[in-house]
Image: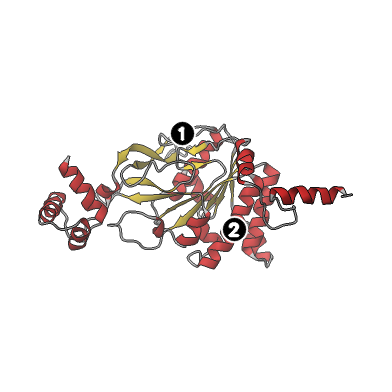
Amino acid sequence: MQNLDEFKETINNELGVTNSNNQFIIKPANEWIEDAKARPKPKMLIGELWFENEICILFADTNLGKSILAVQAGESISSGKSICGLKNEVEAQKVLYFDFELSDKQFENRYSNDYKEHYQFPSNFIRAEINDEYMCNNIVDFEKEFIKSLENTIIEHNIKVVIIDNLTYLKNETEKAKDALSLMKELKALKNKHNLSMLILAHTPKRDSSKPLTKNDLSGSKMLINFCDSAIAIGESSSEKRIKYIKQIKQRNTEQCYGADNVILCEIEKNNSFLQFNFMDFGNEYEHLKTVEITNKDDRNDSILQLHNQGKSNVAIAEELNISEGTVRYVLNKLKS
């Protein structure tokens, strides 16, 4: 007669389920679906750009407002409101913001005005800096120590939303696959263990501003993009530097809503001592890319049409005029309509 353990093993074998000591969790596909059905559908944090329980990467070139948008996102989630017309479906909750960019004085200056009036953040918004004295007095593996301290803080303060500004501080060689892989594995494990939503900021290497933003513009893109659930990029209009645009690069919980043909146009302004992205309109990314050698858009469009009428392909036209194929396609569609 079988004992209890043997009986369980027999049942598991029949179902194809492994025991808890195995490296993998294996169940029939229908059982996975039934288990998932019992869990609530992830809610929007920044519209369709970032959902609950996702690791989202926000990347852009230097001085385009990554930190400004990240703080704005954290402030909105901690107060239960929306930003830039992008819906926030969660109630006000604690947000842990790791700031590896600004000193406390720089942070103060950013969120105050000329009259020394300071913005009052929600009490749910918690900012953290590295303790330099601790780091100087303790010889540690920084990455492992960070992950350990992060987990302790999450448990102590009951945190569900974490923003890290930025990834380069944790790994200054994230362009190397092995470095990106180890870090993202640790962060993903933490996310799954504690049911977190994580926004991680990253830089772009030097890029051609005449080309549209893609996943290839993220430093260490192959590994980082593979391990994140969603990704957002910020670009700058070549025609009006004050205009920034937000583009959806990767998504899993929704269809793409803010791709090249529908980027979110914004202007960075300070309202009531709070520096933020203000929504302006939706637009086409190709209208805001740098035009090389052809400075007048009418001349560019005439050249595109002329070459098109000669029977040249969009790719050939793009190469001849040194612009992106997407710009050629956009202009031709606009002229046809």
Q: Earlier in the sequence, mark 1 or mark 2?
A: 1
The figure's colour scheme reads: secondary structure
Q: Amino acid at mark 2?
A: Lys
Dot 1 surroundings within 10 Å: few (below 14), some, or many (20 or more)?
some
The answer to whether residue 10 is left or right of residue 29 is: right
Instruction: Tell which residue pokes out farthest to the right in this image.
Output: 1
Whether residue 130 is visible to the viewer of this picture, yes or no, is no
Taking the spot 70% from the left edge, 47% from the top edge, the residue there is 15
Query: In the shown orientation, is residue 265 left or right of residue 136?
Result: left
Q: Residue furthest front?
A: 1
Query: Which residue is pictured at 35% across the width and 51% down the height?
Result: 235
On residue 185, which mark appears?
2
Image quarter in which the C terminus is found: top left
Residue 6: image x %, image y %?
83, 51
Residue under circle 1?
Answer: 87
Above or below residue 208? Residue 1 is above
Work out whether residue 41 or residue 218 is closer to the camera in this orientation and state it: 41
Which type of secondary structure does the marked residue at label 1 adopt?
Answer: loop
Element at label 2: helix
Q: Nearer the viewer, mark 1 or mark 2?
A: 2
Q: Quadrant of residue 49?
A: top left
